[in-house]
Amino acid sequence: MTPVLAWSTPASWATEALRDPLALLVDHAHCELGAASTAQTLIARHSTETALVDALAALAAEELRHFRRVHRLLERLGGTLQPVQSNPYAVGLVKSIDRTAPEALFDRMLVSALIERRSLERFELLAAAAAPEQPEIAELFLELGPSEAGHARLFVELAVELHPDGDVAGRLEHWTELEARLIRSLPFAARIHSGPFVQRAAEPAESKRGPAFA
Ligand SMILES: [Fe+2]
Ligand SMILES: [Fe+2]
């Protein structure tokens, strides 16, 4: 089962994000590195959950391979990995989980599934927008997309396995709505999980002359 997003990103987001491909790749590299690191943190925190440990160890190794793939392209295009920036999308979602609740791990798996699903959506938009003029970037996102789809499914499967009585449909509805509200509220940037691109309205002629005092 793959989560269905409650809001679809307009194609204009990808066109604008690709105007700064190096910034986008820096952010993407950190997303992959962060995904590998989060998987390892989950293993350390839930070390008695054998199914989770095994699946997330494999996922961490795969995300690190993705990081290297993105980093190689970043270098090839003349960029350098920059220090990590806070990720208000992932942080905002994870902070919304009640860690004291008995279903906290169930929710954590569903939130991870959604992050993977949103990444897949963004990869597909970027691959389509980059195809004509930035073929190497298009190839990268086309190549990584199927893995993220697999990760989204894996996290839902883990949620079900860890909490067989959990209300998957009900909780997914809750999280998909929250996720959609959050990502739509974020500012646009050349980052994988930024908000929608909003065309600024032209400033009124008077404002260019400064404030008028009557
Ligand atoms: Fe990845
Ligand atoms: Fe992933």
Image (cartoon, rainbow, N blue to C red):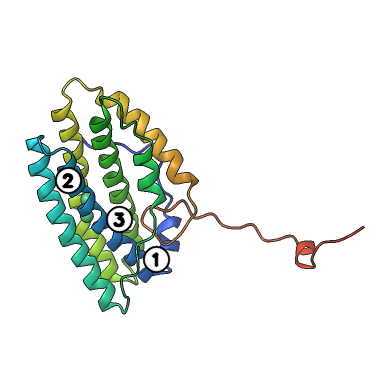
- Whether 21 is drawn above or below 93: the answer is below
Query: Splitting the image into 4 quarters, where does residue 135 fall?
Result: bottom left
Quadrant of the rendered image containing residue 105: top left
Amino acid beneath label 1: Leu
Kind of element beneath mark 3: helix
Q: Position of residue 41 (x, y in %)?
A: 20, 47
Task: Name the residue that disc number 2 marks.
Answer: 150
Image vertical order of residue 206 relative to residue 72, above or below: above
The amino acid type of the residue labelled 3 equals Phe
Q: Which residue is painted at 19% across and 60% down in the image?
A: 66
Residue 145 visible in the snapshot: no
What x and y, as percent, mark residue 133? 34, 72
Q: Is mark 2 within 8 Å of ligand 2?
A: no
Q: Quadrant of the C terminus?
A: bottom right
Residue placed under numbered mark 1 in the picture: 18
Please name the residue shown 11% across and 48% down the image: 57
Kind of residue indicated by mark 2: Gly
**Residue 171 in picture, x, y percent from top left:** 31, 27
Q: Which mark is residue 123?
A: 3
Which label's residue is closer to the chain start, 2 or 1?
1
Q: Is residue 64 visible?
A: yes
Are the residues tagged 2 and 3 within 8 Å (C-beta)? no
State which tag comes first along the sequence, 3 or 1: 1
